[in-house]
C-alpha cells in the first residue's frame, strides 16, 4: 500500500476549520503514485511519492524541471539547463536543443511536451539561421519534425500540445495573430476576442479555456474543440480540470479583480480552495483524479520568492521553504 494512501485517508476524515471556502466533502480514495517536477537548490528535480530524485544536469549551471509525465512505467521530465531545452527519460538526459538543431534552422524555444504511449511529442519554434526573423511552428514526434505553420510572423511562447487517437492538437497563433487550435496542422480559430490560456484532455476530447476579452459581462470560457460546445463563466479561467462529472476551474479571487493577489479553485462553480493572503499567491498546477484534488501553490512572501506547496485535498503534502532556487512546477498522477 502506497504511503500516500494513508495520507489521503487522513484527508478523508479531516475537515478544514480555518476557512469555509476550503471545506471538503468525503471523496473516493484510490492508491496512486504522485509525481511532481520542479527545482531544488538550482537543480532539476522530481518527487515520486515525496521521494526526492535529483536529475543529472550534465554540467549546466542551473537546471529546472518544468513538466513531468509517466507512461508505461517510464518517467519523462521536460525542462531546461541554462539556455538549452532538455528531456530526461528515466533519468537519462537528452539535449533537445542539440537534437532538433538543423543545418539551416536552430531551436528558438520548445514550449511543451506530451507523451502518448511510447511516442514523444514536443512543440516549439525553429529560427532560420540565414533569416533570423523567419520562424516555423513545428512539432516533433519521436524526433521527426512536422511543420505546423511556416514563416511565422507571430510566435506564442505558451503554445501547447495534446494527442488523442494520433490526432495532434496544438494551441498557438496563425499568420494573422489569431489564437486557435491546429488539428493535424489545420487551423481552427477559437473565437475572435477570446484569449485562451491552455488546452486539456477529458477522456477522448480536448477543451480550450481562457478569457473572453470582448464581453464585459462574461469573462471566461471553456470550449470543446471538436464540437464547439462552449460554457461561459463570469470569471476568467486560468486552469481547468475534469474529474468524471466534476469540473474544477482556477480563477482570480475577489470577483475577478485583474490584479488580485489571490487565486481560487471552484468545483462545479462553488468555491473549493482559496490561496492564503500574502504578498501574492499563485496556483501553479491543478489535477483532479477520482475525487482527489492535487494543487501546487506558490506563496510569494516577498517580491521574488516564497514557499512552494503541494496540497492534496487542501492538506499540505510537500513543502519547499522560501528559497528562490526551489520550485514546484508540475503534477502527474498514476493510478495503480
Image (cartoon, grey):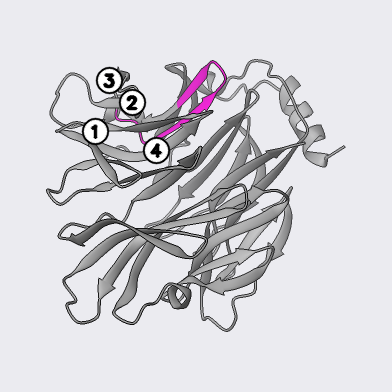
Quarter of the view holding residue 244: top right
Q: Is 215 in front, or is 270? A: 215
Q: Main secondary structure of the magenta part?
A: strand
Mark found first going from the N terminus, 3 or 1: 1
Is residue 99 positioned above or below 68 on the image? Answer: below
Mark found first going from the N terminus, 2 or 1: 1
Identify the residue shown where x is 53% and y is 23%: 19
Determine whether label 3 and label 4 are within 8 Å by CB. no
Q: Measure how far apart labels 3 and 4 are at the Cα level.
A: 19 Å
How many tags in the picture? 4
Determine whether label 2 and label 1 are within 8 Å by CB. yes
Q: Measure how far apart labels 4 and 1 are at the Cα level.
A: 11 Å
Residue beneath disc 4: 199
For this view, does 203 lie left or right of residue 169? right
* Region in magenta: 236-248
Q: Measure how far apart labels 4 and 2 are at the Cα level.
A: 9 Å
Amino acid at each position: 500500500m502506497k504511503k500516500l494512501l494513508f495520507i489521503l485517508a487522513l484527508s478523508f476524515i479531516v475537515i478544514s476549520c480555518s476557512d469555509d471556502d476550503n471545506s471538503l466533502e468525503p471523496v473516493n480514495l484510490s492508491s496512486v503514485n504522485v509525481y511532481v517536477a520542479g527545482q531544488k537548490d538550482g537543480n532539476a528535480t522530481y518527487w515520486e511519492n515525496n521521494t526526492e530524485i535529483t536529475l543529472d544536469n550534465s554540467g549546466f549551471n542551473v537546471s529546472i524541471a518544468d513538466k513531468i509525465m509517466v507512461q508505461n512505467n517510464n518517467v519523462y521530465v521536460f525542462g531546461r539547463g541554462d539556455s538549452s531545452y532538455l528531456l530526461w527519460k528515466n533519468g537519462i538526459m537528452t539535449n533537445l536543443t542539440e537534437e532538433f538543431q538543423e543545418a539551416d534552422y536552430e531551436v528558438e524555444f520548445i514550449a511543451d511536451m506530451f507523451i502518448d504511449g511510447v511516442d514523444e511529442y514536443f512543440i516549439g519554434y525553429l529560427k532560420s539561421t540565414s533569416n533570423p526573423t523567419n520562424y516555423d511552428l513545428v512539432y516533433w514526434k519521436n524526433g521527426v519534425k512536422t511543420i505546423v505553420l511556416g514563416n511565422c510572423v507571430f510566435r506564442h511562447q505558451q503554445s501547447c500540445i495534446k494527442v488523442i487517437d494520433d490526432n495532434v492538437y496544438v494551441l498557438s497563433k496563425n499568420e494573422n495573430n489569431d489564437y486557435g487550435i491546429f488539428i493535424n496542422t489545420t487551423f481552427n480559430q477559437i473565437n475572435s476576442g477570446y484569449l485562451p490560456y491552455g488546452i486539456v484532455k477529458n477522456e477522448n476530447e480536448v477543451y480550450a479555456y481562457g478569457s473572453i476579452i470582448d464581453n464585459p459581462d462574461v469573462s471566461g470560457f471553456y470550449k470543446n474543440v471538436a464540437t464547439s460546445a462552449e460554457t461561459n463563466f463570469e470569471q476568467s479561467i486560468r486552469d481547468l480540470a475534469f474529474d468524471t462529472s466534476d469540473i474544477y476551474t482556477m480563477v482570480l479571487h475577489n470577483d475577478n479583480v485583474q490584479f488580485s493577489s489571490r487565486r481560487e479553485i471552484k468545483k462545479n462553480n462553488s468555491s473549493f480552495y482559496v490561496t492564503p493572503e500574502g504578498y501574492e499567491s499563485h496556483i501553479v498546477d491543478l489535477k483532479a483524479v477520482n475525487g482527489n484534488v492535487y494543487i501546487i501553490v506558490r506563496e510569494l512572501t516577498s517580491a521574488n520568492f516564497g514557499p512552494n506547496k503541494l496540497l492534496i485535498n487542501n492538506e499540505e503534502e510537500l513543502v519547499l521553504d522560501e528559497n528562490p532556487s526551489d520550485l514546484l512546477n508540475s503534477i502527474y498522477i498514476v493510478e495503480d
